[in-house]
Amino acid sequence: MSLASGAANTGTFPNLNIPPQAAAPQLTEEETQAKLSSLRRAQQAQSGKVTPETPEERRRRLKLLEDEQAETLRLIEQN
């Protein structure tokens, strides 16, 4: 008998009183909440929503960009 042949007539009735067995252990409530919070963080990270930066962070970021641009320009002008 091959598995691809579909249902097979064994001549007996199935025993429906046997409770089904889980394929894997069930998640606890804590595990469920941890997975959900992890998924929500990933969703927020992909949604493009960024947390507002403080004025100090903005100044620092702009200063780094300025320095990087000045260095790039210096390298270009050397050649």
Image: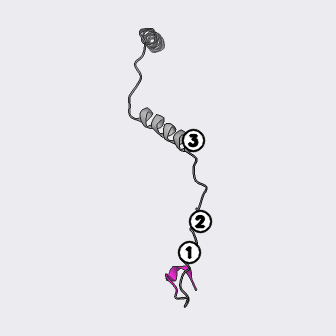
Badges 1 and 2: C-beta atoms under 8 Å apart?
Answer: no
Write down the residue under mark 3. 30
**In front: label 3 or label 1:** 1
Write down the residue under mark 1. 17
- Nearest the camera: 9 or 68? 9
- Nearest the camera: 55 or 8? 8
Horizontally, residue 23 falls left or right of residue 70, namely: right
Amino acid type, mark 3: Glu
Q: Is residue 4 magenta?
A: yes
| Mark 2 burial class by Cα count in 10 Å: few <14, some 14-19, many 20+ | few
- Nearest the camera: 7 or 2? 7
Quick one: SS at disc 3?
Answer: helix
Residue at figure coordinates x 58%, y 73% from the top left:
18
Amino acid type, mark 2: Gln
Q: Which mark is first along the chain, 1 or 3?
A: 1
Badges 3 and 2: C-beta atoms under 8 Å apart?
Answer: no
Horizontally, residue 40 falls left or right of residue 19, namely: left
Q: Is residue 60 above or below residue 42?
A: above
Q: Which mark is residue 21?
A: 2
Quick one: SS at disc 1?
Answer: loop
Q: Which mark is first along the chain, 2 or 3?
A: 2
Residue at figure coordinates x 49%, y 82% from the top left:
7
Q: Position of residue 39 (x, y in %)?
A: 48, 40
Quick one: SS at disc 2?
Answer: loop
Amino acid type, mark 1: Asn
Which portion, as a residue range, is magenta?
1-8
